[in-house]
Image (tube, helix red, strand yellow):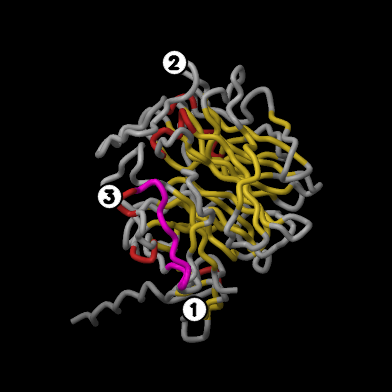
């Protein structure tokens, strides 16, 4: 009789450093991965967070949805965040969101409100809302603040006001997805002034897979000034992470696969990417699921963003809060004296963005702090006095 077939190779073995989740570890002689600082797990695919260190990024009544960090030349830290106005929840992001700026002397904060950076412009293409911002520094030192904008498409003046009421169980997004476009603003200082474009930087393509709308921009700036743009696209039958390339920040942006298909190997939505300054490998975090077993996906590319490899779940909705720092939850009467330390698993943990080790704000470095949006009650209540959304920061072992 024929000899039995050999058993399949274990999935947690490696043959090169790239097998360790894109170079997050060193493949040893016994085909196991020795993880670099900041990563853990059999294939170094999980983020190695500092324990008991997650904290709310700003302790006030702002209803926010994630934040993009950057360290400035004077050593201060800045967050650009999406605030949902008029006591409305995240499902009003297409009608009530605006980009705000916060400042701190330390990476984890607490951050203090500084200004409204990108309010909706009444007569422009982003007249309805601005949302999903991400801050980057160009090779020439200029700040580039990417965001998605919406054109106002409702007849009432102003923006919806949700003060004093909520709709338990209402999970209907307010507004029209088809109005989403990607824009950018420039400044020489995080305090502005900011220069916006008169038209969207990047929009849907009628003959491409993302023919309806584009959103959630995540540019990766290379040393020569060229750009790898990750984004969320939506077509008639597809919603996925898209991929485009440009020689400079102003484009034009060229879709991969001539726009016939989205990126392969990048799961989920809400991408954010960087280049490992030690290995040269390009990485991306995405929102991929929620709860105790998932929240953040991970992918990497070894050829400059052309081809991507999906890795295991990098982190979940489980958090361990900073000890000896109870944080009260304003606006939620039934939880007013409850510490967030009592909420070990978030209902939603989305919009990942990272403070990198490189102090100059470019796309190169090592992850040091993960900022995400957070919501800790179920079922969600979109407005009024309950189920406030907020932003958290979690340090990573360095």
Q: What segment is highlighted magenta in the picture?
A: 321-332
Give the alpha-carbon distance from disc 3 to disc 1, as whole Å. 38 Å
- Packing grade of label 2 (10 A; few <14, some 14-19, many >=20) is few
Gap between marks 1 and 2, in whole Å? 58 Å
| In the image, residue 328 lies in the stretch drawn in magenta | yes
- Of badges 1 and 2, nearer the viewer stands 2
Q: Quadrant of the N terminus?
A: bottom left
Decide: is 203 above or below 64. above
Q: Residue at x 35, y 76 (%)?
A: 10
Q: Identify the mark nearer the N-term, 2 or 3.
A: 2
Q: Which residue is mark 2?
A: 156
Q: Nearer the viewer, mark 3 or mark 1?
A: 3
In the image, taking residue 160 as reference, residue 306 lies left or right, namely: right
The answer to whether one can see residue 320 in this image is yes
Relative depth, front residue between 47 and 324? 324
Residue depicted at x 58% and y 41%:
133
On residue 33, the disc is 1
Residue 243 or residue 177, whichever sits in front:
177
Q: Main secondary structure of the magenta part?
A: loop
Residue found 66% across the figure and 65% down from its top: 357
Q: Which label belongs to residue 277? A: none
Say if residue 266 shows up in the picture: no
- Name the residue furthest top: 155
Q: Which residue was labeled with disc 3?
A: 378
> Quarter of the image holding residue 238?
top left
Q: Residue furthest left?
A: 1
| Mark earlier in primary sequence (1, 2) | 1
Residue 178: percent from the left, percent from the top?
A: 45, 25
Viewer-proximal residue among 333 and 367: 333
């Amino acid at each position: 009789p024929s000899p039995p077939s050999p058993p399949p190779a274990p999935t947690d073995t490696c043959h090169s450093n790239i097998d360790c989740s894109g170079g997050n570890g060193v493949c040893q002689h016994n085909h196991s991965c020795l993880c670099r600082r900041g990563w853990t797990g059999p294939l170094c695919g999980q983020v190695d967070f500092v324990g008991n260190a997650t904290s709310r990024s700003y302790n006030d009544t702002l209803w926010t949805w994630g934040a993009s960090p950057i360290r400035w030349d004077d050593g201060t830290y800045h967050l650009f965040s999406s605030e949902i106005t008029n006591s409305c929840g995240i499902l009003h992001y297409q009608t009530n969101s605006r980009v705000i700026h916060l400042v701190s002397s330390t990476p984890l904060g607490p951050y203090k409100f500084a200004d409204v950076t990108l309010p909706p412009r009444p007569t422009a293409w982003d007249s309805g809302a601005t949302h999903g911002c991400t801050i980057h520094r160009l090779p020439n030192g200029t700040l580039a603040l990417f965001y998605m904008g919406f054109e106002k498409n409702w007849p009432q003046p102003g923006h919806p006001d949700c003060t004093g009421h909520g709709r338990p169980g209402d999970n209907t997004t307010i507004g029209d997805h088809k109005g989403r476009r990607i824009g950018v603003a420039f400044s020489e200082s995080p305090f502005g002034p900011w220069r916006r474009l008169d038209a969207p930087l990047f929009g849907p393509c009628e003959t491409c897979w993302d023919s309806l709308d584009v959103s959630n921009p995540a540019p990766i700036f290379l040393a020569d000034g060229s750009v790898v743009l990750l984004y969320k696209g939506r077509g008639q039958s597809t919603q996925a992470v898209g991929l485009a390339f440009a020689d400079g920040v102003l484009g034009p942006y060229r879709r991969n696969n001539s726009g016939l298909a989205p990126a392969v190997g990048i799961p989920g939505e809400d991408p954010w990417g960087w280049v490992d300054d030690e290995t040269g490998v390009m990485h991306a975090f995405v929102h991929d699921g929620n709860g105790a077993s998932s929240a953040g996906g991970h992918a990497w590319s070894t050829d400059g963003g052309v081809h991507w490899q999906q890795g295991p779940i990098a982190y979940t909705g489980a958090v361990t809060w900073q000890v000896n720092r109870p944080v009260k939850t304003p606006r939620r009467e039934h939880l007013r004296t409850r510490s967030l330390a009592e909420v070990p698993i978030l209902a939603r943990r989305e919009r990942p963005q990272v403070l990198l080790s490189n102090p100059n704000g470019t796309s190169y470095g090592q992850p040091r702090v993960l900022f995400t949006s957070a919501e800790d009650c179920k079922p969600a209540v979109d407005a009024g006095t309950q189920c406030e959304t907020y932003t958290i920061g979690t340090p990573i072992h360095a």
